[in-house]
Image (cartoon, rainbow, N blue to C red):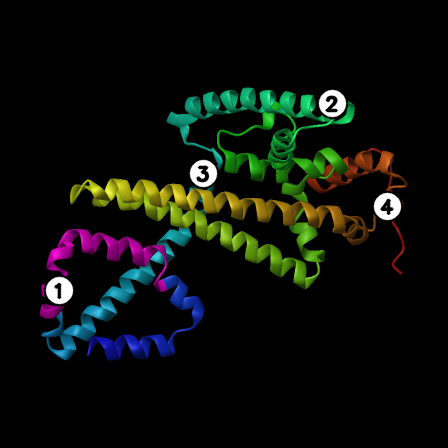
Amino acid sequence: MLSSFWESIGEGLSEKWLERLFGPAFLFWAGGLLLWIGPQNLAAKWGELAALPLVTQSALLIGALLALAASDRLMDAVNLPVLRLLEGYWPGPLRWLAAWCARRRAKGAADKKRRWSDLMLKRDEVGLTWAEQRELARLEAWRHHTPRDAADVMPTRLGDILKTAETRPRQRYGLDPVLLWPHLWLGLPENVRSDLAAARARLDRMAQAWAWGLLFALWGFVTPWALVIALLWMLTAYALALSAAETFADLLLAAFDAHRWRLYEALRWPLPASSDAEKAAGAALTRFVQRGMLGVPVVYGKDE
C-alpha cells in the first residue's frame, strides 16, 4: 500500500513540490527519525507500519506531508534572518565577536592584497613561475569578491561577497545599489530578471539548507553522531552558499554595468557626458532618489 501511495504522489506532484517536500526539511525529519528508531530496527518498524489499517496509513502519511510542508514554509519565513546571520550581521550579544572577526579578516585581506601587488609587479618585470601564476589567479578571483575598503570587510566570506555587490556600483558609478535596486529592477529585461531571481532563489535555498543542518544538531540528544552529521551538513551547505552568492553577486554587478543607463532614462535624467563625470552624476541621482535633493536644477531628457 505504501509503495502505491508513493507512486501516485510521484505522478501527481510537480518538480517544484518534489524539490520542496524532499529537500533539506525531508532530510532533517527523515534523518532524525532514522536516528531515533535506529537503523537496526528500521525493517521491523516498517513492517509494523505496513500492517496498520489503510486509513491509519493514509492519515500518517498525510500528517507527515503536512508537517514537511509546514516546516518548509516556516523556514521560508526566517530565510532573511538566516542569510544575514551567514553574512555576519550578528545579534547584539555577538556584535563584539562580529567586530573582532571583521578586523581580523580585514588584516588578512590587506596581507593578500600586498601579495597580489607583489606578484603583479614581478609579472611585469621578470615573469612568474607556474606556481606563482596559479597563486595570482586565485588572488584575482578572491579580489573580485572582496570589498575594496577595509571598513567594508565583513565577519564572513559570504558577507564579503554580497558586500562587494552592495558597494562596487557606488565606487564605480556613484550609484547606491541597495537604494536604487528596486528602480533598476523595474526596467530590466525579463530574461535578466529571471536569471537574477533564479540566482537569488538558489542562494536562499542554500541558506535554508545550512539552517536545517544547524537544527539537525538537536538530534544530538539521541546520538552524538547527529552532531557530526550536522557539522558536515553545515559545512557543505555553506560552501554551496558561497558559490551561489558569487553567481548572484556577479549577475547583480553585471546588471549595473550593462543596464545602469535605464535608471537615468526612467527618471529622464541626462546621461553622464563622460566616464569622468559619471560618478558625480550617479551620486546626484542617488541623492535625489534618497532625499529628493538637487544641487543644481536638472534638465530632463525628452522621450524618444
Say which of marks 4 and 1 sits in front.
1
> How far, Cα to Cα, is label 1 from label 2?
66 Å
Q: Residue 265: in sight, yes or no?
A: yes
Q: Residue 86 carries which label?
A: 3
Q: Is residue 39 magenta?
A: yes
Say which of marks 1 and 2 sits in front.
2
Which span is picked out in magenta?
A: 21-48
User: Which residue is rendered at x = 16% and y = 56% of the image?
Assistant: 39
Task: Tell me the quarter of the picture where residue 96 sits.
Answer: top left
> How far, Cα to Cα, is label 4 from label 3?
38 Å
Label whose residue precedes the other's in the sequence (2 or 3): 3
Asked whether the residues under the numbered discs 4 and 1 touch, taking CB atoms below 8 Å apart as contact, a structural biologist would say no
Say which of marks 1 and 3 sits in front.
1
State the residue position of label 4: 271
Say which of marks 4 and 3 sits in front.
3
Q: Is mark 4 on a helix, strand or loop?
A: loop
User: Which residue is rendered at x = 85% and y = 38% of the image?
Assistant: 275
Q: Does the magenta stretch include residue 133?
A: no
Amino acid type shown at disc 4: Leu
State the residue position of label 1: 43
